[in-house]
């Protein structure tokens, strides 16, 4: 596992639509996911998308266990989403602060 460099806001890759994952259960995909978790944990993140580490693929991870950046939030189990499609369940919205490893220091 490797801690990868996180791209920062303004990097052109972060503005492109990521490519869908076409092959599953490959060593490359397993390594990508392992590196994403290693990177997220090293930076005390709660989630990370593959483009944030320079890989234009539709892979997202998130998890909150013991995280100093989010000391009061509910635990969230480790989750991997591959080629996700997000569909709102309702028009209801919730206001709150959000952080991003690609936009350090801003909420």
Image: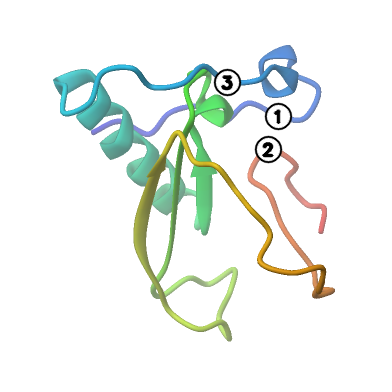
Residue beneath disc 3: 18
- In three-dimensional space, the C-alpha distance between marks 3 and 1, rounded to whole angstroms, equals 16 Å
Of label 3 and label 1, which has the lower sequence position? 1
Residue beneath disc 2: 102
Mark 2 crowdedness (10 Å alpha carbons): few <14, some 14-19, many ≥20 = some
Front residue of 34/71: it is 34
- In three-dimensional space, the C-alpha distance between marks 2 and 1, rounded to whole angstroms, equals 4 Å
- Decide if residue 37 is on the left or right side of residue 86: left
Quadrant assignment for the C terminus: bottom right
Compared to residue 105, the image places residue 70 above or below, namely below
Front residue of 91/57: it is 91
Secondary structure under the numbered disc 2 in the rendered image = loop
| Residue at screen point 50% across, 83% down | 74
Compared to residue 61, the image places residue 51 above or below, namely above
| Residue at screen point 68% across, 38% down | 102
Q: Position of residue 1 (x, y in %)?
A: 23, 33
């Amino acid at each position: 596992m490797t801690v990868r460099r996180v791209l920062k806001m303004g990097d052109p890759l972060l503005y492109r639509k990521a490519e869908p994952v076409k092959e599953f259960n490959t060593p490359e995909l397993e390594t990508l996911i392992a590196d994403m978790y290693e990177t997220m944990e090293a930076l005390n993140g709660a989630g990370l998308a593959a483009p944030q580490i320079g890989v234009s693929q539709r892979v997202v991870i998130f998890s909150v266990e013991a995280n100093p950046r989010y000391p009061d939030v509910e635990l969230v189990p480790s989750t991997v989403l591959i080629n996700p499609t997000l569909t709102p369940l309702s028009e209801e919205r919730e206001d709150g602060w959000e952080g991003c490893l690609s936009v350090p220091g801003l909420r």
